[in-house]
Image (spheres, grey):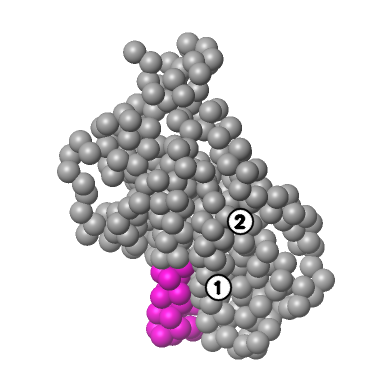
Amino acid sequence: MTAPADAAGGGTEPLPARRALAVVGRLVASRPVRWGFVLAAVGLACYAVVADWAQIRGALGELGFWPLAAAMVSILAALATTVLMWRLLLASMGSPLPLAAAARIMLVGQIGKYLPGSIWPVLAQMELGREYRVPRSRSASASVLVMLLTLIAGLLTALVTLPFAAGPMPYRWALLATPVLLVMLYPPVLNAIIGRLLRLARQSPLEQPLTVGALLRAMGWSFGTWICYGLQIWILATRLGAPAGKTALVAIGGFAFAWSVGFIVVFAPAGAGIRDVLLLVLLGSVLRTADAAAVVLVSRVLMTVADLLSAAVAARFVRRPPSGAGDNPQTAG
């Protein structure tokens, strides 16, 4: 019997390809693969901390407890705005979720970013969403849209901040992608792209297309995310003597730009290396190189800890739905 997703795609895919997709789907959904995914992602995240522990310990001692605590709070606030954006987009597609359920799916799934490639968080969130009867097509679309809107907002944030603070830098080439991304935000264009991607992935089409209002609200949350992430850089940098005013622009715009480039370079887990180097260069306009390196290093550690901590809390304290809630093929996609 043909699966619902195959029927939605018109059945034009060759039989071997359909069988291969079915096998991949079963593997991704299996418990051993899901636990292996989590362990691999957590292991890589922890390795990033252990590998640089000697430098991290020195930087932590210089910064002090309260700036580190304030930076951690701002990172957690950024994660919260991301959850709210994902939940809003999912609801606009027809799958409203309680905040706690959305947090569990988003925060646990997003640790997949520590694996090379940007697809792993999407796959994880698709499978976690099935527990709450969210069709795979909707959770995948919401997750991809979060990435796209975050990327667009990041580039726009860099565009309106860095030219006024960082001076002449070789970063403007990446901003050329902004007009193309803005065109993709036009709802008819974006809905057509989503529909095409879902057909290629053999998933059911969206029943409710995205609206202008939903996209604008989601973009608002995305800009809030960049402000919160930039705030943690500002807190750390000013603690080490950076001027407050100029550093605010460099911190917000620099982090947004460095993350955006790191995201585009998909082979680097969580943008590792790429993002750090770019942020180090940009912070060089307000800090000595050694101090800028300390800020970059501590920021990455704090973000890793925040990712793991939030995922652990969401997995431990958010109650799962009753067993079998995600087994209906009409709702599970």
In the rendered structure, which amino acid carries the disc numbered 2? Leu
Q: Residue 21, relative to residue 45: is it above or below? A: above
Of residues 329 and 118, the one drawn nearer to the viewer in this rendering: 329
Residue sitting at x 46%, y 59% = 85
Helix, strand or loop status at disc 1: helix
Name which quarter of the figure residue 245 lies in: bottom right
In the rendered structure, which amino acid carries the disc numbered 1? Ile
* Distance from Cα at disc 2 to Cα at disc 1: 14 Å
Q: Which residue is mark 1?
A: 227
Of residues 45 and 103, the one drawn nearer to the viewer in this rendering: 103
Helix, strand or loop status at disc 2: helix
Residue sitting at x 31%, y 29% = 329
> Dot 2: within a 10 Å radius of its alpha carbon, few (fewer than 14), some, or many (20 or more) residues?
many
Q: Which mark is residue 151?
A: 2
Name which quarter of the figure residue 170 lies in: bottom right
Asked if disc 2 and disc 1 are in contact, CB closer than 8 Å, the reply is no
- Write the start and end of the magenta stretch as one range: 58-78
Screen quadrant of the N terminus: top left
Of residues 188 and 279, the one drawn nearer to the viewer in this rendering: 188
Indicate the position of residue 264 as horizontal and vertical percent values.
63, 49
Residue sitting at x 34%, y 57% = 103
> Dot 1: within a 10 Å radius of its alpha carbon, few (fewer than 14), some, or many (20 or more) residues?
many
Q: Earlier in the sequence, mark 2 or mark 1?
A: 2
Residue sitting at x 51%, y 56% = 214
Residue 190 counted in the magenta span: no
Q: Residue 165, relative to residue 212: is it above or below? A: below
Q: Residue 211, relative to residue 301: is it above or below? A: above
Residue 76 counted in the magenta span: yes
